[in-house]
């Protein structure tokens, strides 16, 4: 999963991002706002020093017992911060190597009249609490290449919805996000430019909020980064009987912990230092998914032929090595082209790993041996609009990143083995999730042809940044075949 800003790509899975709140107002519900732009910049600097990956600035309180401020005043307050932001970025340090640096900037506003005047260089995210009643903000975000946060709610902001009742909150929320994502995409945004926010405390009472937190995976399954605005929320006060928001930081840490283990990607918070320390402690206990790649290539770097026929350019021992590697896997993943070319069934002796195929179109042959052989459960990863024939398989309408996120929270799947093809492998490297590479190098064969697939797709396709791996094993077989194993290096991969 990727969050793409105008200048950066943030690749998940990674440590969740902390969004530090800076209120440029005098009526924040937690009493931490300021109308002094110098003080607001100082607060942002403190947040970054304490571990914030994103600074979220807002000039108008979301409180419903306050009138909306004039558009001109909101723009003036935001501009007072934006004018000072570049200097802050040039000076800011970082709390550790995992922190996004330089920090990203989020603008917390919802009126298109404000958005139109504020979006531009330096802005990385629009945090829109309007529940997207129309596509104007989405079109403005598409125009400037800025990701859009879509928050779930009902009715206009700044209006109380404390008496909202839900018969099926999660069903309604799922339908809401389906509609709003479609609207955002129609306006010109891509899925990696959309963030979802379930809108805790907005048109929701205590039990509604707790339900959303319990069933958060229904929102995560959309395949977009999910933000939880957990800090000092009313739901914490309701549970702990704490009317003063400043007393709710321990409850905020509890929601942070729950959200991390449920798979949320971003957290909007006031007390950055406490949340950063909690992240550091929780990180070793987060669910992990080990991704292994196994491929054979020739001296010119090809992994298949231009004719999409079985290559058979390695030895019997290479196939036996593949079978041993398969025994490590709880799931095996291939692209549709590889499945069809090699007529794969992905069976493993004495084991039943998940057998997974990714195909954007979903055009799979019902007569293929995969669907007529015993073995592990079949899973198909297809596009949202794919017309899939009636097949004995579980259908996942998501991107590769979304499927990996599902696997990461599936207890029975700890290791995923990918056996091709080139485009699939390239995407795994782009997501920076590959932990182990097993290569069989057969230099006695040269395929040639500029369209023959390579390790990372077609020649001319390049990764967005370097990926570093250490050679941990090299076994020479015969005179012209070498088995190589690489593990992900401790060196930073870059982003």
Image (spheres, grey):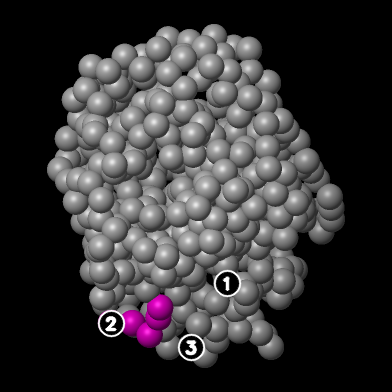
Drawn side of residue 225 relative to residue 473, left or right: left
The x and y percentages for residue 484 are: 77, 52
> Residue at image x 19%, y 51%?
155
Mark 3–mark 2 CB contact (< 8 Å): no
Instruction: For marks 3 and 2, give the CA distance.
Output: 16 Å
Depth check, front residue: 13 or 389: 13
Query: Given this view, does label 2 or label 1 mark the residue nearer the observer?
Result: 1
> Residue at image x 34%, y 61%?
204
- Which of marks 2 and 3 precedes in the sequence? 3
Please tell me whether mark 3 sits on a helix, a strand or a loop: loop
Query: Given this view, does label 3 or label 2 mark the residue nearer the observer?
Result: 2
Depth check, front residue: 418 or 80: 80
The stretch in magenta equals: 390-394
Residue beneath disc 2:
390
Drawn side of residue 391 relative to residue 52, left or right: left
The x and y percentages for residue 3 are: 45, 40
Query: Given this view, does label 1 or label 3 mark the residue nearer the observer?
Result: 1
Depth check, front residue: 80 or 486: 80
Instruction: For marks 1 and 3, give the CA distance.
Output: 24 Å
- Which of marks 3 and 1 precedes in the sequence? 3
> Residue at image x 60%, y 21%?
45
Residue beneath disc 1:
410
Asked if residue 391 lies in the magenta stretch, the reply is yes
Residue beneath disc 3:
373
Secondary structure that dominates the magenta span: loop
């Amino acid at each position: 999963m990727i969050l793409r800003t105008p200048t950066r790509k943030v690749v998940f899975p990674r440590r969740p991002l902390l969004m530090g709140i800076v209120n440029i107002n005098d009526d924040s519900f937690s009493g931490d706002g300021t109308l002094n732009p110098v003080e607001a910049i100082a607060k942002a600097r403190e947040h970054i020093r304490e571990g914030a990956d994103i600074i979220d600035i807002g000039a108008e309180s979301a409180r419903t017992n306050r009138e909306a401020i004039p558009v001109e005043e909101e723009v003036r307050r935001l501009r007072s911060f934006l004018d000072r932001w570049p200097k802050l970025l040039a000076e800011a340090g970082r709390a550790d190597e995992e922190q996004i640096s330089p920090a990203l900037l989020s603008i917390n506003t919802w009126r298109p009249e404000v958005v139109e005047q504020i979006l531009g260089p330096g802005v990385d995210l629009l945090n829109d609490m309007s529940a997207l009643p129309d596509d104007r903000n989405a079109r403005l975000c598409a125009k400037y290449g800025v990701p859009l946060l879509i928050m779930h709610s009902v009715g206009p902001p700044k209006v109380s919805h404390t008496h909202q009742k839900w018969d099926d909150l999660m069903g309604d929320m799922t339908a809401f996000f389906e509609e709003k994502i479609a609207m955002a995409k129609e306006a010109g945004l891509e899925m990696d430019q959309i963030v979802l926010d379930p809108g805790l405390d907005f048109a929701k009472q205590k039990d509604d909020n707790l339900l959303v937190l319990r069933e958060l995976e229904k929102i995560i399954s959309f395949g977009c980064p999910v933000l939880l605005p957990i800090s000092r929320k009313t739901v914490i006060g309701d549970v702990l009987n704490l009317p003063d928001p400043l007393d709710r930081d321990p409850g905020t840490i509890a929601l942070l912990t729950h959200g991390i283990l449920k798979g949320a990607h971003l957290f909007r918070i006031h007390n950055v230092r406490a949340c950063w320390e909690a992240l550091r402690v929780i990180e070793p206990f987060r669910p992990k998914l080990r991704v292994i790649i196994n491929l054979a290539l020739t001296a010119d770097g090809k992994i298949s032929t231009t004719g999409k026929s079985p290559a058979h350019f390695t030895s019997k021992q290479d196939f036996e090595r593949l079978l041993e590697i398969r025994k490590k896997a709880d799931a095996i993943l291939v692209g549709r082209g590889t499945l069809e070319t090699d007529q794969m069934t992905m069976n493993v002796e004495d084991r039943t790993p998940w057998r997974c195929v990714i195909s954007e179109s979903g055009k799979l042959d019902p007569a293929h041996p995969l669907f007529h052989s015993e073995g592990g459960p079949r899973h198909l990863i297809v596009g949202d609009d794919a017309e899939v024939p009636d097949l004995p398989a579980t259908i996942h309408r998501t991107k590769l990143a979304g499927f990996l996120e599902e696997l990461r929270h599936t207890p029975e799947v700890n290791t995923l083995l990918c056996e091709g093809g080139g485009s699939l492998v390239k995407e795994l490297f782009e997501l920076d999730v590959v932990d182990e590479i097993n290569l069989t190098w057969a230099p006695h064969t040269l395929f040639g042809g500029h369209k023959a697939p390579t390790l990372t797709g077609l020649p001319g396709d390049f990764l967005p940044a370097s990926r570093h791996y250490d050679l941990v094993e090299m076994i020479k077989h015969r005179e012209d075949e070498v088995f190589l194993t690489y593990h992900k290096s401790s060196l930073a991969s870059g982003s």
